[in-house]
Every structure is written in C-alpha cells, then in structure tokens.
Amino acid sequence: MSEDGAAVLDVKDLRTVFETAQGAIHAVNSVSFDLRPGELLGVVGESGSGKSVTMMSLIGLLGTTAATVDGAHVNFDGMDLLRVTEDELRAVRGAGIGFVFQDPMTSLNPVFTVGFQLMEPLRNHMGMTTREARQRAVELLELVGIADAEKRLSDYPHQFSGGMRQRVMIAMALSCDPKVLIADEPTTALDVTIQAQILELMKELRHKLGMAIVWITHDLGVIAGIADRVMVMYGGQIVELAPVIELFKNPQHPYTRALLQTVPSVRGSRAERLRVIQGQPPILFSPPQRCSYSARCNHAFDRCLAADPARISVGDGHDVACFWDPETGEPR
Amino acid sequence: MLNYSIRRLLLAIPTLIAISLIIFLLLDLAPSDPTANLPLTIPPEVREKIRQSLGLGDPIYIRYLLWCKQFFVNEPLNILEQWFGWGSGDRLRVLSWQTRSPVVDLIVERMPQTLWVVGMSYVVGVLIALPIGIISAYRQYSWFDQIGTFVSMVGFSVPTFFTGVLVIVIFSVWLGWFPSIYDTTHQVTDWESFLFQVRQMIMPVAVLALFNAAQISRFMRASMLDNLNQDYVRTARAKGLRERTVVMIHVLRNSLIPVVTVIALGVPQIFGGAIITEQVFKVNGLGQLLIISIQGGDLPTVQTLTFIFAVLIIVFNLVADVLYGILDPRIRYD
Ligand SMILES: Nc1ncnc2c1ncn2[C@@H]1O[C@H](COP(=O)(O)OP(=O)(O)OP(=O)(O)O)[C@@H](O)[C@H]1O
Ligand code: SF4
Ligand SMILES: [Mg+2]
C-alpha cells in the first residue's frame, strides 16, 4: 500500500518476559516493526513463536498474568503506549486498536446478548446513548453481513454459528473505527468454506474502511493472498520481514525457507506434501545468546552458536536476521 | 420454563409419596419405644395399653395410611375450612405422642427461632462469602487470598459444637458480652428488647455464618478462577472496558451461575435447623424438636418433620434448576 506517510504503529525493541514457577520465559525478544496506514501486515510462525504475545503486549492485554513488557517505544496516535497510564491505554484498546481473536466459540461472553456486547465499546469509548449505540450496532452487523441484524441483537452467542460469531467479533473490533485491527488467527478455528467467507469479508472491509491490519496466521497460503508485507517470527524474534512477493520469491532465512516448503500443495508425493520442520520451537529462559533457530537449522555453523544474529537489510524493505547467505551458500 | 416447572412439580408427587413411605418403614424398623421415657414405676401392662392407644398395635400399612390421611387430607382441609369459615376444621390431625399436640402446630411454633438464627446465619454467610470469594480469586495467592483460604479451612473443618462452645467461653463466660443461652420467650417490643435480641443472636449466627461462608466462599473463588482465564474475558479487556466492569459484570455474571444454584440447594438445610448449633446455644428450633422427638420415640413428629425436609429438598432442587435456566441462556428446558 502507500509507502509514504508516517507509520500508524511504530514498535521498537519490544520485550516481554513472563515470570513463571519454572523461571523467567523470554517470550518476546527485541521486536521492532512498523505498520503503515492501510497496510496489511501478515505475521507467520509456528505455535509458540510469540506472535500473540507480541501483539497483546502492545496494548497491555496480557492482563493479570505476571508479565513485564518493556522496550524503546510503541508509538501510536502520538502516544508511546509503553509509557501511558492504564486509563489512556484502555482508551486505545477497542477504540484505536481493535482485536479479533482466534476462537469465536469462546471469545464472546455466553450470558450476554450479542447486542449488549456490541454496544459496550460504543457506549464506553464513543459516549453513545443506548439508542445511538443500538442503531450503530445494527449498522455494524449489516456491515459484516449478518442478515436480520435488528432482530439478532437480542440473540445470545450460542444462537450463532461459528462463522457468524466471528463476524460479530469483527463487527465488535471495528465498532469504534480503529486505525489498526489486529486479527489473531481469525480463521483458524473455522472450517474451510467459512474461512474463505471471512477472508473475503476482511478484504472487502479493508478496502471500505481503510484501516491497517495485522493478520496473524499459520497459513502462508492465506498470507500470500492478502498481505502487503510479511513478518516471520521465531523464538519471540522477527527473523525475516519483507514485502509479500519478495518473501515468496526470495526467502532468505532458513526458517522461512523451511516454512515455505511446509505449505501443503496438491502436487508432489505424500511425504513431500506433508513435510514439516523437524524439532520443537525453543522456550527461552534467558535472552537469546545464539541464533534461536540454530538447534533446527540445516545451515548452522560455529558463528550461529556464538552470537544472536542481528537484523540486517538485504534489499528494499527486506530484513533478515541470519548469518548465512542463501545466494552464495556461505556465511555473510 | 413454566411448563417444565409444572411437569417437574407433578413428577415430584409420586416421588414424595415414595419418600414418605420409605421414611415410615425406616422409622418403624428403629428400635424405639414411645413409653421408654415414662417413669419406671409404670407397670408393663399399662405401658402396653399406652402403646395400643397410640395405634402401635395396628398393622403397619394401616398406620401409614392413617398418617397419610391425617397429613395430606385432614391438615389442608382443616386449614382451608378455618380460613374460609366453612366448617369446624377439627378433623383428626397428626398428633405428637410426646405432647399430644398437633405436630404442625409444634413446627409452626418453632419455625421463627430457626428462621431467625439459622436463616440469618445463612444470609450473613452468603453476604460475606461472595465478596471474599471474588477478591480471593482476583488476587489469587495474595495475602488476602491466603488469609481467606486459612479462615475457610478453619471454618469448614472445625465443627460448630467446638466453635460454639469456644465463643460461649470467650464472649459469655470471660467477657460477659453476650448471653450464653438463647431466650426463645423473649419478645421484641421496643428498642431495648430489640438490642437484646440482636445480642443473643450474635453468637449462634456468627458460628453458623462462619461455617456457611467457608463453603460458599471457596465455591465462589473456584468459579471465578474458572472464568477469569476464559477467552471472553480477554475480549472484554480488548474492548477497553474498565477492569471493574470486566470482573464485576463479565466474569461475575458467569461465575454466579453455579454458585447461585449451590446457595439455593443449601436453603432446605436452614429449615432442617442446625441441629448441633441449636443444641449448643439452646435455641429451641426445628433441629432441637427433631432431636427431642427422636429421643422420645415420637414417631409422628419425626415422620412429619423428615417428610417436610424432603419436600423442601425437592422444591429447592427445582428452584435451583429454574434459576440455572434463568441465569444461563444456553440452558433451555422444554
Ligand atoms: N501466560 C503465560 N505465561 C508464561 N508463558 C507464556 C504465557 N503466554 C505465552 N507464554 C509463552 O510465550 C511464548 C509465545 O506464545 P504465543 O502465544 O505468543 O505464541 P503464538 O506464536 O501466538 O502461538 P500460536 O500460534 O499457538 O498462537 C510461548 O512459548 C508460551 O509458552
Ligand atoms: S543464523 Fe545460523 S543457525 Fe540461525 S538461521 Fe541462520 S544459519 Fe541457521
Ligand atoms: Mg497465538
């Protein structure tokens, strides 16, 4: 999308540490990225790579868990979200930044009507009266393609199907016209045809409303279809960041290359189609001292164990954090 | 919901009849003798005569049907006739063998004491248990939670006859603040007598409230903890709601569902009277009536009281189910 214009969200050196009984878990390690107006940034990585925690850390959504979030800055709307009061942060949540979560079956409160839950942020952030909020809630449900919106406001979440609930979640996230929408695997829990519908809906809404979107997913196929840029995460770090076409054409990081090979395709033998990356993603009990992918990397060499590779630029808007150069097959 | 309730109530009728029969048969098996408490000088023939006059010579099914007629037919008819002045309303009622007065009158006489002391302790217990449970869960492992857990353990595991005697020793004997015996003849007529009533209620109510609160606060805490980590809580926070709204509206509304049903299921216990506590503080409520009747072999009283408890248990089971249906929109009875 538009390359010019200041970033709507500018994250620098974000770090999140969980205090657990087993020790400190460094879930997000020095993450930096920016989000441009109207852009769709895809975030990919295996389970446990820190995608969700990164996004939740941005707006203090880790709740009451024993987590410390630290960093250089998280600039949004003229504020540094790391240094505002809890009340100011709360005013950003749901208003400036909207969230859609993975599992629509459990993300809505079962004992309140959909209308009540939709109207909550409207009354809270926009100071609407119940009548205005009701009016707007109907518009929102219509916007996300729910028929008979007026009547459905008084229905409870269990009266909606999974796909419909996710539409409600999207309506809720969009209710206060956020500048940024963070969608954390919004289609993962849905079956394939519904996934496609939600995807279509998001594409359409994005062009209608023009907000910037962060789209977290496991599915590189989805990313290829909608993202402008892609951020690959591993071990709580960004290991590669590139425009979508560049990433698919010219992947630099061994992890990205492995991920691209795991994309299920209809061609090739069964073994080839189901190829997965051997091994487990790490749980980091200290800040990374070496390349966090080294235990699983085919190209690892001595330097990878001695230091954590810094993120370097290898082209126009293409960053990678790796000591190995796929072009030459040699260390850089 | 209404249909469901009516159906449940109709189904309860055969259940209750079966229960009344079982109670009757069980009580008949008990080796008790209504004349055992009479002076030893009464000769055996006279004792036998007394037994015959109480109807003990009849076969068991006659005695059961007699009780059924007296309780299910005569009692309600008497009440109706007296209310509307239709007739004399003096059909034969279920009579206590010990006092020869109608059992229902005995119950009505003792009900207020039990409701005041045991009922009040339940209300107080619930009112302190809910906030404690909520705060304990929200601040899990904080000092508040630790103290709450400890007090609940104590309240739950130390029997009321121990805590009862303990508070009597401390507050009546040593400090002399409260009377150690509950005066059931006391009438509240003015401010002065009201204060006395409050003072004599404090200890039994406190002892029982501690016991009730211990259980319910644990339950509330567990239910809150179950809900605090749910996805919808994260959604509520992501919407930018105040933390108080998130906890006191979104989480609490869900957490209360099982707790409310447990509270409803506990209500019949109030009417059962806290037998031990009533003994310790000499409150002559229903619990005490039951004990005396059992000791005196007063079968009609025991039978009637036990049956009324069974009715209450069934009714409050239904109340709990209906409340569940009202509180949880996912539940549909039809
Ligand atoms: N509350 C928590 N306490 C301790 N560790 C946590 C907590 N939440 C997340 N983590 C750790 O943070 C790491 C990153 O988790 P995160 O949920 O961000 O992964 P993810 O990339 O979103 O995975 P998924 O694709 O499964 O959603 C994991 O290793 C996890 O163990
Ligand atoms: S830095 Fe080394 S171990 Fe890490 S991905 Fe690159 S080659 Fe592999
Ligand atoms: Mg996640």
Image: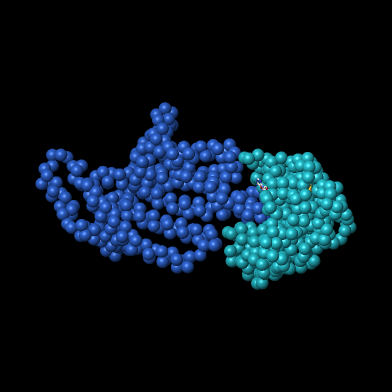
Q: Which residue is depicted at the point 37% across and 64% down?
A: B11
Q: Position of residue A173 (x, y in %)?
A: 71, 59
Q: Position of residue B228 (x, y in %)?
A: 60, 50
The mark tally for this picture is 0
Residue A118 lies in quadrant: bottom right
Residue lying at the far top in this picture: please name it.
Answer: B174
Colour used to depict chain B in the structure image: blue
Q: Which residue is depicted at the point 47% across and 52% down?
A: B262
Query: What's the image's color scheme?
Result: by chain
Q: Which chain is cyan?
A: A
Q: Which residue is depicted at the point 64% across and 66% down?
A: A191
Q: Position of residue B82 (x, y in %)?
A: 30, 60
Residue A218 lies in quadrant: bottom right
B303 sits left or right of A72 in the view: left
Q: Nearer the viewer, residue B209 or A258?
A: A258
Q: Position of residue A245 (x, y in %)?
A: 82, 62
Q: Nearer the viewer, residue A126 or B162?
A: B162
Residue lying at the far bottom in this picture: please name it.
Answer: A148
Tell me: residue B300, above or below residue B6.
Answer: above
Tell me: residue A178, above or below residue B124.
Answer: below
Q: Which residue is depicted at the point 37% across and 46% down?
A: B273
Q: Nearer the viewer, residue A148 or A290?
A: A290
Q: Is residue A310 visible?
A: yes
The image quadrant where one finds the N terminus of chain A is bottom right
Q: Is residue A10 visible?
A: no
A57 sits left or right of B194 in the view: right
A100 sits left or right of B254 in the view: right
Tell me: residue A203, above or below residue B101.
Answer: below
